[in-house]
């Protein structure tokens, strides 16, 4: 039934101990003295921490929840509770229907059994009958694209082959609830695309919880986002762009990294807008569509007549989205034959970068581009605020008209 609540999480919390010996002692203490425990409920003891703290949400059939956060935010712990692998310390989980989960690579596979035998084992765990599995096995094998190796022991499979088989079982058996935790990152591009298309089709009859560090994937298939940090849900929204923006705000700024520099070094670097400026290693706030100007000063350490300059802007996903060049697309050649500290200015009009923190890289070659002299990564951070958060790297202000 469309709109039916399949997952209900109420005040979910789970704590762990950082020390094994202390954890074992707490376990014994809780086991034998639970009826006369003087400690306050919900209070942490020494060396304990909340892996998940007071998380609540509902997920209906036809919805895909994108669960995002940095490593250690509590995402995997939350998924293990949802899948029944561990019990919460507080709160309640209600799961209505059959659950298919891809939480850890190869989890649930018997390594000495063949791929075909593992299909039957895994599908049976999901609650399907032998006849239902017989009816679906051809589709599972075909979707996985590993027909040639399906009767080979899984212990000889590559990580990508395990992902193919695991996802194929979970997806083709059409569970009511499908949980996916980052495993698609192991697959190749073509199979990831195939999986994302399949998830979109599954939303007609299932609820999906999808964990990924790839924000383009989250933007593509999720219709809700839950952002976690330090075990807590800090943002839950159906505005995917807003949720992704919150995720990027959690990312710590990277430090400047310099390689090379024996022949030439970067003496000064400044980024400017009409409202703000930032120096080498700092953060420049940029409003959507503003002009930006870079000023660079180099110092020569040897006799060099010219330098070939390149500036690259990387998006928060570490994908190069803008390559700033000149000279008719061949790159800018800086004449420095008469100056030991040559300077250059670069003006970029109407920079429509998407929301998030973007890193600037400066690369310097010899004038003929045969010799790399200098590379400076994270020379500047550009923090962009946009009114149109989306999955695109660049927002283009095209002219529209009604016909």
Image: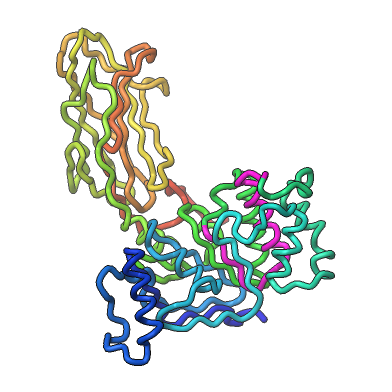
Q: Nearer the viewer, residue 194 or 105?
A: 105
Residue ID at (61%, 55%): 106
Q: Nearer the viewer, residue 326 or 316?
A: 316
Q: Position of residue 185 (x, y in %)?
A: 54, 49
Left or right of 297 in this view: 369: right
Q: Nearer the viewer, residue 171 or 34?
A: 34
Task: Count the numbered circles shown.
Answer: 0
Q: Quadrant of residue 370?
A: top left
Task: Give above or below for 149 relative to 101.
Answer: above
Task: Give above or below for 270 relative to 169.
Answer: above
Task: Give above or below for 342 relative to 294.
Answer: above
Left or right of 255 in this view: 146: right
Left or right of 220 in this view: 336: left
Which region shows up in magenta?
156-181
Q: Quadrant of residue 17?
A: bottom left
Q: Position of residue 329 (x, y in %)?
A: 42, 23
Residue ID at (27%, 85%): 39
Residue ID at (65%, 58%): 109
Residue ID at (38%, 71%): 52
Q: Position of residue 162 (x, y in %)?
A: 64, 51
Residue 174 visible in this rendered orientation of the protein: yes
Q: Quadrant of the N terminus?
A: bottom right
Q: Quadrant of the C terminus?
A: bottom right
Q: Quadrant of residue 10?
A: bottom left
Q: Position of residue 132 (x, y in %)?
A: 81, 69
Residue 388 visible in this rendered orientation of the protein: no
Determine if the magenta segment contains residue 95. no
């Amino acid at each position: 039934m469309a709109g039916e609540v399949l997952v209900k999480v109420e005040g979910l919390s789970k704590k762990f101990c950082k020390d094994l010996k202390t954890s074992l002692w707490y376990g014994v203490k809780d086991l034998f003295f639970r009826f006369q425990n003087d400690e306050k409920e919900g209070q942490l003891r020494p060396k304990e921490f909340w892996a998940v703290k007071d998380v609540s949400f509902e997920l209906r059939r036809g919805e895909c929840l994108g669960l995002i956060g940095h490593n250690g935010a509590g995402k995997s712990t939350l998924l293990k509770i949802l899948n029944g692998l561990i019990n919460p310390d507080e709160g309640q989980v209600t799961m209505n229907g059959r659950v298919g989960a891809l939480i850890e690579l190869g989890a649930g596979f018997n390594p000495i059994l063949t791929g075909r035998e593992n299909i039957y084992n895994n599908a049976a765990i999901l609650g399907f009958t032998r006849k239902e599995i017989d009816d679906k096995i051809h589709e599972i094998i075909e979707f996985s694209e590993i027909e040639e190796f399906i009767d080979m022991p899984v212990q000889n499979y590559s990580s990508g082959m395990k992902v193919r088989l695991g996802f194929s079982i979970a997806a083709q058996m059409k569970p009511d609830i499908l949980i996916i935790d980052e495993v698609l990152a192991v697959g190749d591009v073509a199979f990831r695309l195939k999986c994302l298309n399949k998830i979109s089709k599954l939303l007609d009859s299932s609820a999906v919880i999808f964990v990924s560090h790839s924000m383009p994937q989250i933007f593509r298939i999720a219709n809700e986002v839950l952002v976690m940090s330090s075990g807590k849900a800090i943002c839950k929204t159906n505005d995917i762009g807003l949720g992704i923006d919150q995720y990027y705000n959690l990312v710590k700024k990277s430090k400047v990294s310099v390689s090379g520099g024996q022949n030439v070094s970067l003496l000064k670097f400044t980024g400017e807008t009409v409202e703000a400026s930032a120096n080498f290693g700092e953060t420049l706030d940029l409003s959507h569509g503003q002009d930006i100007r870079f000023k660079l000063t180099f110092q020569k350490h040897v006799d060099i007549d010219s330098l070939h300059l390149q500036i690259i802007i990387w998006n928060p996903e570490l994908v190069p989205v803008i390559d700033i060049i000149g000279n008719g697309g061949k790159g800018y050649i800086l004449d420095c034959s008469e100056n030991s500290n040559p300077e250059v200015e670069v003006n970029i009009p109407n920079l429509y970068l998407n929301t998030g923190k973007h890193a600037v890289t400066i690369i310097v070659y010899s004038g003929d581009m045969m010799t790399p002299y200098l590379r400076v990564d994270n020379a500047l951070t550009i923090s962009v605020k946009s009114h149109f958060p989306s999955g695109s790297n660049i927002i283009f202000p095209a002219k529209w008209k009604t016909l």
